[in-house]
Amino acid sequence: MFKSLNRIRAAFAQARRRRRTTRELNELPPEIRKDIGWPDTARDDGIRLPF
């Protein structure tokens, strides 16, 4: 049971880091986003959980 709870907690933590990184990349100026290959409009995949 605790193993499952730890996996769920880890999945939520990973989703939170992914959202934060996406938000930070979207806040960069368009020139920098173009240089690093970040799309103008990022897809919203929602939360990706392994279950």
Image (spheres, helix red, strand yellow):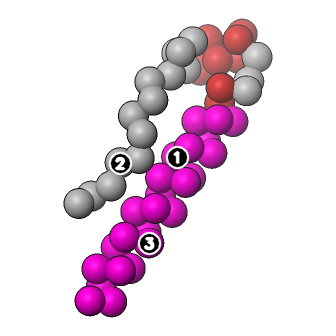
| Residue density around tag 1, few if under 14, some if 14–19, many if 20 or more, within 10 Å | some
From the viewer's side, name the closer residue of 11 and 38.
11
**What SS does tag 3 mark?**
helix
Q: CA distance from mark 3 to mark 2?
A: 13 Å
Q: Is residue 15 left or right of residue 17?
A: left
Q: Which residue is identified by label 3?
A: 9
User: Is disc 3 surrounded by few (<14), some (14 to 19) or many (20+) residues within 10 Å?
Assistant: few
Circle on res. 48: 2
Q: Which mark is residue 18?
A: 1
Residue 36 placement: quadrant? top right
Q: Residue visible at 72% across and 10% down?
A: 31
In 3D space, how far apart are the residues under numbered discs 3 and 1 (Cα atoms)?
14 Å
Would you say 29 lies left or right of 50 here? right
Q: Outermost residue toward the right?
A: 29
Q: Are marks 2 and 1 in contact (CB under 8 Å)?
A: yes
Amino acid residing under circle 1: Arg
Question: Is 7 in the magenta?
Answer: yes
Q: Which residues are magenta?
A: 1-24
Q: Residue at x 33, y 55 (%)?
A: 49
Q: Position of residue 28 (x, y in %)?
A: 74, 24
Q: Residue at x 35, y 80 (%)?
A: 5
Pick the quarter of the image with the N terminus.
Answer: bottom left
In the displayed structure image, the side of residue 49 where residue 43 appears, left or right: right
Q: Main secondary structure of the magenta part?
A: helix
Which amino acid type is marked by label 2? Answer: Arg
Question: What's the residue at 44%, 24% (across, down)?
Answer: 43
| Residue 21 pos. (x, y %) | 61, 42
The kind of secondary structure element at disc 1 is helix
